[in-house]
Structure formats: C-alpha cells, structure tokens
Amino acid sequence: MSAPQDKTDDGGVPVPVTPAGATGGAPAELPPSSPAGRGMFGDQGTGDVSGYGGLVRPQRPIEAATRPYGGYFDEVTDALEEAYPAFGEAIEKVVVDRGELTLHIRPERIAEVCQVMRDDLSLRFELLSSVSGVDYLGADARRLHVVYQLTSMTYRRQVRLETAVSAEEPHLPSVTSVYPTADWQEREAYDMFGVIFDGHPGLTRILMPDDWEGHPQRKDYPLGGVPVEYKGAEIPPPDRRRSYQ
Amino acid sequence: MSASNYATERETAEGKVFTVTGGDWDVVLSGTDPLNDERIVVNMGPQHPSTHGVLRLVLELEGETVRELRSVVGYLHTGIEKNMEFRNWVQGSAFVTRMDYLAPLFNETAYSLAVEKLLGIEEQVTERATIIRVLMMELNRISSHLVWVATTAMELGAINMMLYGFREREYVLEIFELITGLRMNHAYVRPGGVAQDVPDEAIAKIRDFLKLMPKKLAEYEKMLSGQPIWLERTQNVGVLDATGCLAMGVTGPVLRSAGLAWDLRKTMPYCGYETYEFDVPTHTDGDVWGRYLVRLAEIRESLKLVEQAVDRLRPGPVMVADRKIAWPAQLAIGVDGMGNSLEHVAKIMGQSMESLIHHFKLVTEGFRVPPGQVYVGIEAPRGELGVHAVSDGGTRPYRVHYREPSFVNLQALPAMAEGGLIADVIAGGASLDPVMGGCDR
C-alpha cells in the first residue's frame, strides 16, 4: 500500500499525513488512509511478528478513466455530452471503478446536470435512488462530498454523480426541483455533514434534534460515549479504545 | 388523576394548546371558537399506537379533513452509520442488522454484497452461501409482510388478523432461530458468506412451513378480502400513482401497486435471482387495497422462491475459501445460543498456535478492504435498500450510508393524506410499511 509516511502525535499514535496533491483542483476519489491498519500499540514498524501484516492485498490506485469506459458508460457520457452544452466545463473527472461509473460534477452545476440526466430521452434517469454525504477530511481541500445515485428504469442503468464542496463554503444547488425525493435525503446530508443545499424548500435537521450543535458524521466530530464499567474493569468508549493494528 | 388533568389548556402565541389524552374531545371543542378557528393542529405521536413506531405526524385539520401533514422523524436515531466507522468490517453486520428490525437479513445481505464488491470477491462467494442468502431473505420477506398485514389490520380495527399474522411470523422466527441462533438481529450473513450452515432440522421445518403457509394465506383472504369494513377502509384510500411514486422515490410494493413492475430482483438481479422462477405481482389502483393484494401475492411468490432455494441446496462450503477474509471461528449452537464451537476453541487453544494467531488477528484487527466506493441496491420488503460503502484501505469502513426505503417512502405520506380524512392517514401511513428503526438508523 502506498500510504504516506505517518507522523506521530505526542502519545505515539500514528496520525495520517495529508497526501501529496490532496489540495489540488479535482476532488479526491480516495479518502485519506487512516491509522487503522498500521502500527500496533503505537509501534511504528509493522509490529507484526506473525507475518500476517505482510499479506496486504494489492491495491490498485483509482485514476480518472480513459475512453472507452466499457459497457453502457460510453453511451451515457456521450448522451450527456450531446444533451448538455456545458459538459466540458461541468464534468471535472470521470472515474470507472468496480464496474461503476462516477461523474465528478462541479457543485454549482449539479442541479442542471440532474435535469438533463432525468429529461434527455437517451438518458432517462427517472429515479434518484440515494443522496449521501462523505467527509474526505485530510484528502481533499473540498472535503465534503455529496454522492447521488441515479437509476434509469427505462435502460436499467446506474450512474453515480459526485460533487465536492469545502467546509468553509459548503453551498451547492438543491436538486429537489428535479427529484422531489431528494428533500429528506438532502436534509440528512445537511444534518450530518453541514452541506447547505441552496433552493431547498425547508433545509432543517431531520435525524438529530433541532437544537443540536455540529454535524455528527463529519470526521472531526468525535463519536462520543462514556466509559463503561464491567466486572471491575473500565472499558473506554469505542473511539478511545486501543486499536489493534 | 383528577379530571382537570385531561385536556388541560394553555394560551400560547400561536393560539390555545390542549393536551388531549382520550375521551375528552368535548372539552377541546368547548374551548375553541368554531367560527374563527376553522383549523386546528393536531400532534399525533411520536408515541401513538397506530403510527407504526415512534413517528410523529403534525396534522392541520378542518373538521375531519387533513389540510396539511408534516411527518417528524428521528426519534429512533441511534447513529449506526457513525458507529460503524469505529468497528471493523465484519462487526458492521451486527450493526446494520439492527436498522430495519423487521428485515434484518436484507440489511445484512446488502451490506455483505457491498463489502464483497469492494473486496472484489463476488465470484468467490460459494453457491451454497448465495442460495442460503436467497432462502433467508425470502423467508424474511414473508415474515416482514406478515407483520405488515398484522399491524395494518390492527390499526384499521381487525384485531384477529393481528394475532394470526404474528402467529405465523413466529413460525418463521423459529426457523431463523434454528438456523442463526437468534430470532432477530442475526448478524448471520457476513462478508464472504454466512456465519454457519443450515442444519437439517431447519430444512424439515421450512418444508412444513411451505405446506402450512398457503392454507393460512387463504384464511387471511377469507377474513379480509371480502370484508366490507376492510374494503371501505382500503379502497381508493391513500392513492399514489406511478408518477408520484417515482417523484417521491417510492419503490417496492407501493410502486408495484401503482402498476409499475419494478423489482430489483428482476430488473437488476443479484444473488442469482435471474435463475429463479417467480412473478412480480402488480396492481393498478395505487391504493391501500392494491398494496394489500400485492403484498399477499408477494408472500406466495416468496414461498415459491423458498421452495426452489431449498431444492437447490447442495452440500458445500458457506464461506469463501480465502482464510484472510473468512471468519475464523466455527460456530455452533449450544444450550445458551450460538457461539464458538468447543472443538474449534480446543483446537486453537490446545493444538495450533498459528490458528490462534490467525484467529486473534482477524477478530481484533479484521481484514483490509481496498480503497474505493460502491453502491449496491437490493429489493427489500419495503423497496430499494441501497448501501453506499466507502473504504480508505483500512480495516474499518470509512463511510457506510443506507438508502433506507422506510426513510425515503415516508416522504410520500403528505401526498397521500392531504385532502383526505384523518382516519385515512392511518391507512395510508400503514400502507407504506415504515419501520422507524430503519428510517432513523
């Protein structure tokens, strides 16, 4: 695994270093590699005497795909390019990985792209299956990603649209006018990640209490929890437990 | 409690507020001015016997007509998605199974399929494991639909049906207990396969169930299908057409009751569903009645699938051969439930140091999953259950998001209920079959 070299915090626990190029233009496809998986009890080597740690699966880097993408992916991108004049400017990157197509869209264009994806006769993505947020803290200057899973029932195809915004300027247009089903799912992304969907009819918290502070699914938001006593021993909360690596 | 505890009233900036506890409607009416206060706002839930769990509905009423409805969710939010980021990939199964507690095996299977796709080992999952997954999911679909018929009938006043539905569901839960050791929250389907093999007694019990269930279904139909009150309460109630369903993202039996035969088992098959013989029942009315018929028909189709799956079972492994992924423990059902088999414990503790190390590493650390993201959607009893999983290359999920059909479908409730009667809110809401554990996660 081509992980960046780890620094150590005061307690000797490895902390991830921002990968080189992480603050560049295009959104990252990969989250930063976490300390999980490396270093045991603060040990900086592999800490592994069993030989187990040497058996790391080969990890291929995910890069922007080049044509042909394979399958229906070429047809979809061609159709979008034809139907959407601002294609070249709106699409930041195309990624094909594990048999799934991801189009990285410039955040301010997401509603327009969704409109075309839904309405164009050769695209027909009638259903927005899912909207979810991911926080790429440490890997991407625009750390908050919003991921849209579109399904075309006519052609039985699936495409993922992904956008990235920064935590300082977390604004992007809402797609509720195109897909009303995005209503609650965008509220969830706002609630959990603090992404602000402009034009949403009522962007309020949905799962957390209305007066909650902070956005719990962000990576810099602690899991929380209290230590539990069990048979005389104190078990720390999960995010403060020693991790076996 | 004195009489003054009922229907207490207080003045607020928004108007008079009454706390109603039942049997005190006259007090409320005497406290309002019927000429000037045409609309009253009624807060239903979150603790209400007929809202299917801790769902809160805020209704704006004119007489008995619902003018506006807003649903408030989140009362059962337990932070499962966040918690999973602090456990290894296999431990995730034990978390996701607790989301939609009426369809735990779907949650587990969707999660396992996503992890397997991230690992790139879909091809290595054994045939027997896949057939067992189908078998368990279809049994689970039956038990979930039975709870739906039972609770919906209860909410509309048919208490007998509630008892019958739960009685047959209990039979399915007994089968689950025989196979997984637990009635609910199984964590049985794991990344790489299933936790343990299906015992022979369970197969015999499933065969008995296949003989029993069609008779019971006929009984339900005899009791409900021609029943005037049932027809009155369900026909032309909570109507949502296919366009409305798609706009609101509603999938599953509700979409199929509006005439669109969209079932991921047929349209985007997984787990080898394309090789099974079954139909996708539909209806055209798009009302509660249609959803009732579709769900009963789906139970019959699931029985067909269970029968085919049982017939296909051939001896073989139920976990991938890759020992760096397969859970190292051999499980067995003891007198106190499922746990590590004593033979396995004796082997790793007494005979093989390497087995012990291997066991320790996989259990405490877990396996690494190559970085990337996937989305897997399967057809759960309530509609499309999607898992968006992101890995950073470590031993724990970086992010797991569940596209929960209960959560998405509940958005359609105002579209179904506004303009109708308050009694139909119950029927319409029940017909969506929301499970709040899944909705709030």
Image (spheres, helix red, strand yellow):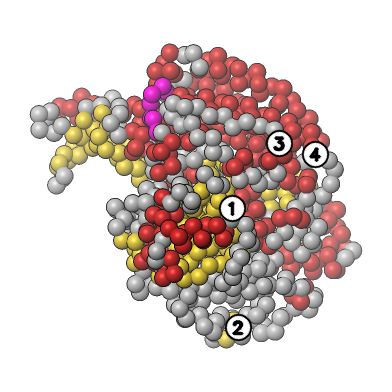
Cα distance between the residues tagged 4 and 1: 25 Å
The residue lying at 72 percent from left, 71 percent from top is: A57
Pinpoint the chain carrying mark 1: B
Where is B148 relative to B86, above or below?
above
The answer to whether residue B51 is above or below residue A243 is above
Which of the marked residues, 1 or 3, is nearer the chain's N terminus? 3
Q: Which residues are magenta?
A: B234-240
* Secondary structure at numbered mark 1: strand
Marked residue nearer the N-terminal end (4 or 1): 4
Q: Are marks 2 and 1 on the same chain?
A: no
Residue at 76%, 64% in the rendered image: B324
Give the Cα separation between the discs numbered 3 and 4. 13 Å
Mark seen at residue B376: 1
Which chain is home to disc 2? A
- Badge number at residue B276: 3
**Residue type of the residue flagged with mark 1:** Val
Number of numbered discs on residues: 4
Q: Is residue B386 left or right of residue A184?
A: right
Residue reaching furthest left? Answer: B35
Residue A83 position within the rendered picture, expressed as x and y whole percent measured from the top left: 43, 58
Q: Quick check: is B239 in the magenta stretch?
A: yes
Residue at (39% x, 18% y) in the render: B232
* Helix, strand or loop for disc 4: loop
* Amino acid type of the residue tagged 4 in the rendering: Leu
Residue position marked by numbered label 4 in the rendering: B313
Residue B189 % position (x, y)? 68, 49
Q: Amino acid at mark 2?
A: Pro
Tell me which label, 3 or 4, sits earlier in the chain.
3
Q: Nearer the viewer, mark 1 or mark 3?
A: 3
Select label 3 or label 4 by which is in front: 3
* Distance (Cα) linking label 2 and label 1: 30 Å
Instruction: Locate residue B362 relative to residue B216 in the image: left or right.
Output: right
